Amino acid sequence: MDSAEFSERGGLTWGPSESGESTYVWGPFAALRVSSQRLRFTVRLWKPLAVIAKLVWFDRNAEIDQGFELDRAHIVALRRRHAPFARGIVVEHRNAACPAYIVFWPTSYPTLLKALQQHGYQVVESPSSGGRRFGV
């Protein structure tokens, strides 16, 4: 990681759409790296947890280690997302190679917000969640 990047751990929600089936990873198992050129998302589970997750999901071929990145040119908007006990960032983008719906739930929202602003990103308020469970 070069000195211009910022890294934050947290949770990640991703999937084909906001109302569709999504994957959720909580805790310190997701990371977001912020640079002025791109946002990089990674999900890594420790091997014992990965085995348990595959058993719980009943899919032994499930990909536990995930990663994708969005160049700044593909980012349409960054929106605040409020949930009962968390605040996240919804990433709207135009990169067909990445999941259409991405929400990062940082361990320190104020720290991430400041880092995004320092790298030239603007985070705007999300429209009302419309009563969806946990604001997702």
Image (cartoon, rainbow, N blue to C red):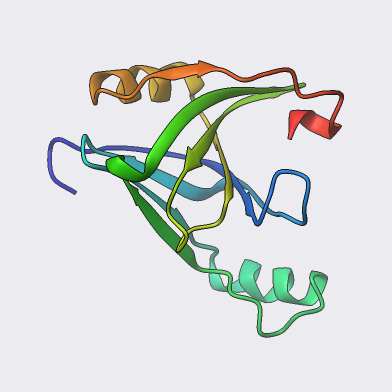
Which residue sits furthest left?
A: 3
What is the x, y in percent for residue 119? 24, 26
Which residue sits furthest bottom?
A: 61
Residue 118 picture quarter: top left
The residue positioned 47% from the left and 28% from the top of the image is 78
Left or right for 50, reference 134:
left
What is the x, y in percent for residue 74? 36, 45
Name the one closer to the observer, 5 or 103. 103
Q: Height in image: 13 above or below 51?
A: above
Q: Height in image: 63 above or below 29?
A: below
Q: How many marks?
A: 0
Q: Height in image: 51 above or below 88?
A: below
The residue positioned 79% from the left and 31% from the top of the image is 134
Q: Height in image: 106 above or below 115?
A: below
Image quadrant in which the C terminus is located = top right
Name the one closer to the observer, 38 or 88. 38
What is the x, y in percent for residue 7? 33, 39
The residue positioned 42% from the left and 59% from the top of the image is 68
Residue 6 picture quarter: top left
Left or right for 13, reference 92:
right
Name the one closer to the observer, 91 or 31. 91
What is the x, y in percent for residue 92? 51, 38
The residue positioned 15% from the left and 35% from the top of the image is 4
